[in-house]
Image (spheres, helix red, strand yellow):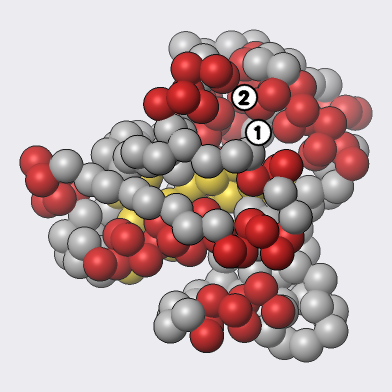
């Protein structure tokens, strides 16, 4: 389903694009950091993760928070069209085999009625595969403290018939918001365990 643009240019200008490789940024997630590697990324390195720069398009500031509240939590699906050109253009710059959106648990999908990441990709006319599953339901990440987010264990799975879509492939793993990286890093680890060649993490906001 393609919707009309639900945001005028003056409103769109209120969103803050991520400026990478600036002083005071982590070299991997581009979050604010007094050191080259922020404490969150140091945590993932200590967990044995090989980190590469995360790709995010916009800062998660008050404007983006309001957007997410209306889009994801209040269910205004027409807002998925706002960033379709930004997402399409940035993904066109990458070399990859498969795009995989972050999954929702069955309960979260039932409550929300749509997968907000898949809808963003639909609006951007990006082909993707909904093969990554999240069998266990968790409390919303946005309702947790930073410490609790990092400590939350996530489980993912892919059916045997879909493993060929991962084995030896370069994957772009897409989410709407990157905060501590917990969800994406655990999903990335799972995909690497399934013999993905490389997993690029990508989000609308950071």
In this rendered view, identify the residue nearer to me: 92 or 48.
Answer: 48
* Number of numbered tags placed on the structure image: 2
Residue beneath the point at 32% across and 43% down: 132
Residues tagged 1 and 2 counted as in contact (Cβ below 8 A): yes
Please tell me whether residue 186 is drawn above or below residue 125 in the rendered image: below
Spot occupied by residue 47 in the image (x, y as percentages of width and height) = 47, 80
Quadrant hosting residue 44 = bottom right
> Could you say which disc has been placed on residue 98 in the image?
none
Residue beneath the point at 32% across and 61% down: 190
Residue beneath the point at 52% across and 85% down: 46
Q: Residues within 10 Å of mark 2 (few under 14, many from 20)?
A: many
Find disc 1 in the rendering and name its residue: 83
> Could you say which disc has been placed on residue 80 in the image?
2
Quadrant hosting residue 11 = top right
Marks 1 and 2, how far apart in space?
7 Å
Q: Residues within 10 Å of mark 1 (few under 14, many from 20)?
A: some
In this rendered view, identify the residue nearer to me: 48 or 144.
Answer: 144
Residue beneath the point at 21% across and 62% down: 194
SS state under label 1? loop
In this rendered view, identify the residue nearer to me: 151 or 116.
Answer: 151
Is residue 170 visible from the viewing direction of this image?
Answer: no
Left or right of residue 28, residue 174 in this image: left
Quadrant hosting residue 146 = bottom right
């Amino acid at each position: 389903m393609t919707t009309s643009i639900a945001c005028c240019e003056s409103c769109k200008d209120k969103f803050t694009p991520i400026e990478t490789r600036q002083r005071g940024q982590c070299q991997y997630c581009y979050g604010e950091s007094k050191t080259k590697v922020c404490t969150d990324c140091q945590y993932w390195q200590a967990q044995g993760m090989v980190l590469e720069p995360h790709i995010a398009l916009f800062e998660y500031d008050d404007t983006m928070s309001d957007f997410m509240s209306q889009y994801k939590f209040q269910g205004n699906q027409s807002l998925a069209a706002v960033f379709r050109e930004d997402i399409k253009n940035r993904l066109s710059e990458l070399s990859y085999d498969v795009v995989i959106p972050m999954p929702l648990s069955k309960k979260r999908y039932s409550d929300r009625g749509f997968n907000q990441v898949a809808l963003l990709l639909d609006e951007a006319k990006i082909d993707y595969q909904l093969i990554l599953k999240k069998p266990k339901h968790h409390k919303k990440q946005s309702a947790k403290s930073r410490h609790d987010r990092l400590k939350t264990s996530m489980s993912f799975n892919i059916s045997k018939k879909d493993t060929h879509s991962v084995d030896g492939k370069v994957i772009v793993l897409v989410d709407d918001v990157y905060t501590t990286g917990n969800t994406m890093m655990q999903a990335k680890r799972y995909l690497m365990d399934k013999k993905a060649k490389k997993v690029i993490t990508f989000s609308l906001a950071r």
